[in-house]
Every structure is written in C-alpha cells, then in structure tokens.
Image (cartoon, helix red, strand yellow):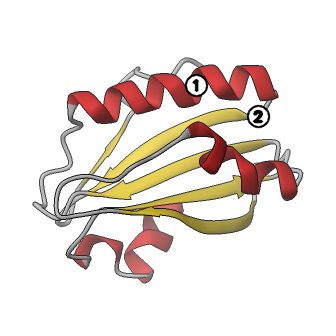
Amino acid sequence: MVVDLCHTIGLQERASEELHVFNLNTKNDVIGMELVSKGTLNASLVHPREVYKGALLANANSIMVVHNHPSGNPEPSRADKEVTTKLIEAGHILDINLLDHIIIGNNQHFSFFSHGLIPK
C-alpha cells in the first residue's frame, strides 16, 4: 500500500533523493505522510529527530520510512543501513516502531523488513 502511494506521487521519477515518513495508527492505517528530507542526486541528510517529530505530533503508533534512489537501483547503501539502525534505536526509545524502510527504484523496491533487516 505504501509503495503504491509512493508511485502515485511519482517518487520513483524524482531527480533527487527524497525521504518520506508515513505515520500509522494502531491498526497500521496511514494517518499522515510528510516529506522529511530532500537531498541531492545520491544523498539525503536524515536525522532521527526529524523523522520522528511528525509521528510524535500525530500520536502515531508506528512509522514507515520511504526514500527513492534516482539511479533506479533500489539496493541499500551502507549509509541507508546505518540510518535504518539509528531509526530503529530511536524508535525503541520513543516507543514508536519503525515497521519498514523501503527504497523505491525504477519499477522495483527494496524492503528492509522483507529482507530481515528490521526485527518484528
């Protein structure tokens, strides 16, 4: 569902990296979405405080993070993996679970959860 929303807004076609956060309620319904970071062709600055700020204000139970790779290749970089680890840790402290980090490419995506990189 979140991947479909990202395709609807054309995230896979953006010329620079964008990171969006989807805020979810206890039933995992999307209750809000926001653009948190817009970067360059191959980088975007992401800090946990910016990612979780909207979730706290929305009283979200959990979040999903989505960003695009303008190259079209959705394979995560080392920086993507490091940011995901920081977001998981921050979520534990705030009691707001990070359910998934999805990278959107050309007609494909990479899910950290599906690849076992985010614990249940």
Residue furthest to the bottom in view is 9
Residue 47 percent across, percent down from the top left: 52, 41
Label 2 sits on a secondary structure element that is loop
- Horizontal placement of 83 versus 43: left or right? right
Residue 101 percent across, percent down from the top left: 46, 41
- Horizontal placement of 86 versus 91: left or right? left
For badge 2, the amino acid type reads Ile
> Can the viewer see residue 113 in this picture?
no
Image point (24%, 37%), residue name: 76
Q: Which residue is mark 1?
A: 88
Residue 108 percent across, percent down from the top left: 22, 57
Q: Quadrant of residue 14?
A: bottom left
Query: Between 61 and 51, which is closer to the camera in this rendering?
Result: 51
Label 1 sits on a secondary structure element that is helix
- Horizontal placement of 97 versus 38: left or right? right
Instruction: Give the CA separation, mark 2 to mark 1.
Output: 9 Å
In the rendered image, the vertical position of residue 111 relative to residue 119, given as above or below: below
Q: Quadrant of residue 115?
A: top left
For residue 96, the mark is 2
In the rendered image, the vertical position of residue 13 relative to residue 113, given as above or below: below
Residue 42 percent across, percent down from the top left: 17, 55
For badge 1, the amino acid type reads Ile
